[in-house]
Each structure stands twice: as C-alpha cells, then as structure tokens.
Image (cartoon, rainbow, N blue to C red):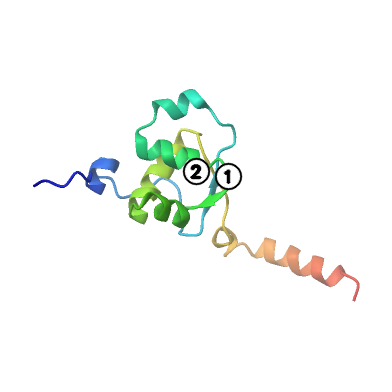
C-alpha cells in the first residue's frame, strides 16, 4: 500500500536553498491579503499564506502544517520573492551592525535614572 503523503522534495521541486535568510524564529506576515493570489497557490503555500495573515514564525508554520522546517523555509521564501509575504528582520540581522548598538547605548545613557 502506498503512502498518500507527498514527499517534501516534491513540494519544493527539490530545492533546499532559499533567497531569504529565514531562521526558525523569523516572523512573517501578509502585508495585503489577496484572495485571488491565495486561490492560485498550491495547497501548502496557500495554507502558509493564510496563516501568515497574522504575524507568525517559521517554526509555528512548520508545526501547524506538519512540514519540515526546510520545506517551510523554501515555500515562504518563494512567497516573499513574489511579494506575497513580508519577512520581518530578526535580531540576528543587526548582529554585526555596531552603529545600531552604539545608538542604542547612547539612547540608554540619555534615559533619566
């Protein structure tokens, strides 16, 4: 008896790399919901798109769809490339930006004690 489950590589066309840096904690959201776009997506991408109407993380999407993180990352990256979802910057994005850290430190120093 064959499994009815679709293999993960079939959902991504064998792709494992993404165009966007998508960490487990990366948040995504839908800037402008488009019902006709949702109708044109494959079922897994449509579900991701629908769930991202409220800000949600890559990990939450993976659990909700019971799909591996790698698959969710590829599908979300495709949606982001289309402009269908917005990828929120993570703290990791500012890790090496000393300018940001210096501005934060200056702001903290100006706070009344």
> Which residue, given by chain and number where applicable, does mark 2 sit on?
51
Q: Is residue 94 above or below residue 34?
A: below
Q: Are marks 2 and 1 in contact (CB under 8 Å)?
A: yes
Between 44 and 24, the one nearer to me in the picture: 44
> Which residue, given by chain and number where applicable, does mark 1 sit on?
54
- Spot the residue most to the right: 112
Residue at mark 2 to residue at mark 1: CA–CA distance: 6 Å
Q: Is residue 75 left or right of residue 54?
A: left
Between 94 and 90, the one nearer to me in the picture: 90
Residue 68 seen anywhere in this rendered image of the structure: yes
Residue 22 seen anywhere in this rendered image of the structure: no
Q: At x 50% / y 59%, what residue is drawn?
A: 25
Sort mark 2 into few (<14), some (14-19) or many (20+) by Cα contacts within 10 Å: some
Q: Is residue 90 above or below residue 80?
A: below
Q: At x 59% / y 61%, what residue is drawn?
A: 91
Q: Quadrant of the C terminus?
A: bottom right
Q: Is residue 17 left or right of residue 108?
A: left
Residue 92, horizontal then vertical, whole percent: 54, 62
């Amino acid at each position: 008896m064959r499994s009815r489950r679709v293999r993960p590589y079939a959902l991504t066309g064998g792709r494992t790399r993404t165009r966007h840096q998508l960490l487990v904690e990366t948040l995504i959201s839908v800037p402008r919901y488009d019902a006709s776009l949702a109708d044109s997506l494959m079922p897994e991408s449509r579900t991701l798109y629908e769930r991202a109407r409220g800000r949600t993380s890559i990990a939450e999407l993976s659990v909700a769809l019971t799909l591996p993180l790698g698959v969710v990352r590829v599908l979300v990256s495709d949606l982001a490339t289309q402009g269908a979802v917005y990828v929120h910057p993570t703290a990791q994005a500012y890790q090496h930006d000393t300018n940001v850290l210096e501005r934060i430190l200056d702001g903290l120093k100006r706070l009344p004690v």
